[in-house]
Amino acid sequence: MTTARRWLPWFALAAAGLLALAAGIYFGGNTWDRTSDDARGKDAGVLFGVALPDATGQEQSLGQWKGKVVVVNFWATWCTPCRDEMPEFVKVQRELGGRGLQFVGIAIDQPDKVQEFSAEIGLNYPALIGGYGAMELSKALGNRLGALPFTVVVDRSGRVVHTQLGPLREPSLRAIINQLL
Amino acid sequence: MATLLAASLPGVVAAQPKLLEPERAFAFSVQALDDKTVEARFAIADGYYLYREKLRLTVEPTALVEVPMLPAGKIKDDEFFGRVETYRGRVAVKLSLDKPEPGQKVTVRAESQGCADAGVCYPPQVQNLTVALPAAGTRPGPPVEATPARKSWFN
């Protein structure tokens, strides 16, 4: 065997190892600080313990949706990319609501603006209103930069399985949800 | 190879584009140009923009001679807000102070709101910077930055 051929398997293994490490770092960005499964369950607990008013001022506890596949979307009317993706959420909610999907919007915004936009797009899922506290909640869920839109997907057993900063378009959204329903 | 990759992926997937902290995307600085003028500046990173309409500059404790003249921005056709003016790159606004004391310290407060082309928007930011006014006829003071430039391996 030539020298190159003898070392090739080792190089391949090292390359694969490095790739796996890189993938782990890239995809694991949000869980960099986590050390155990308990942390993941805990994040969803943080979420389900929250109560926020809806646009009519009525307090809604997020815990009421535990057991469903919950997609919590942090947004605002002053955020164009947020407004952009919501009609798709409405569509998917309409289609898959019967199978246990529940979108919940948390607007870092003013009630009147939220109501106006909700009516405009025919919003068919709860729009809760939050301020600084809601932004801090999104940070606790991994929104390090405090930017919008920020979306969290929780499975039926109450575990956070996906977080996304930036638009979450229909194809990706469906791919994630279909696995959980 | 596939198993190696799968083993290193945690149960939670976090999709997060490479984005800057707002203080770094919209770096705010102030410089006292003379005994009665300060200049407020934003150095906006590539791929980010500020809304002109949302920019507010105020000064304390001295009053301003006039409402700050914000430069014209680039027209952007926003899907929901229609035609808006945005700032990219560098923007500077001169603030003329009304009868300041010699050597006075003034604080410039900037309220701004911006987004990234990548598809996120930041909530309104408020930043304050304090500078000392130089004596009349002397050189401008040094620029004061809100976020000193720093290099990080992760950025």
Image: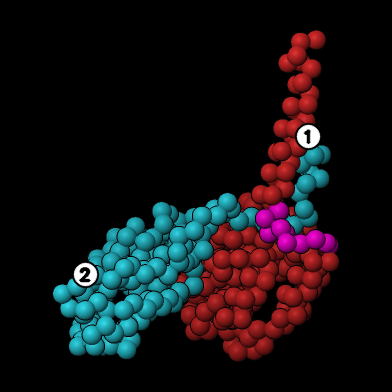
| Chain under callout 1 | B
Using the numbered discs, state the Cα–Cα distance from disc 2 to disc 1 in whole angstroms: 64 Å
Compared across the picture, whether A32 is left or right of A115 comes to right
Image coordinates of residue A150 in percent, x first then y, are 60, 65
Note whether residue B84 is visible.
no
Q: For residue A35: magenta?
A: yes
* Residues flagged by tags 2 and 1 on a common chain: yes
Give the magenta range. A28-37
Q: Position of residue B5 (x, y in %)?
A: 76, 41
Q: According to the colouring, which chain is red?
A: A
Which numbered marker is on residue B108? Answer: none
Q: Is A127 rendered above or below residue A6?
A: below
Q: Secondary structure at mark 1?
A: loop
Residue type marked 1: Met
Q: Is residue A63 magenta?
A: no
Q: Left or right? Give the position of A3 relative to A89.
A: right
Q: Read off the residue under disc 1.
A: B1
Q: Amino acid at mark 2?
A: Arg
Residue A153 coordinates in the image, percent (x, y):
71, 63
* Image quadrant where one finds the N terminus of chain B: top right
> On what subunit does the disc labeled 2 rest?
B
Chain letter corresponding to the colour cyan? B
Q: Earlier in the sequence, mark 2 or mark 1?
A: 1
Q: Is residue B30 above or below residue B97?
A: above
Which element is circle 2 on? loop
Pointer 1 local density, CA inside 10 Å: few below 14, some 14–19, many at least 20: few
| A13 and B35: which is toward the camera | B35
Left/right placement of residue A138 relative to residue A11 reads left
* Residue named by callout 2: B139
- Please state which of residues A28 and A107 is positioned toward the viewer in this rendering: A28
Q: Residue at x 32, y 83 (%)?
A: B105
Residue B141 percent location from the top left of the image? 28, 71
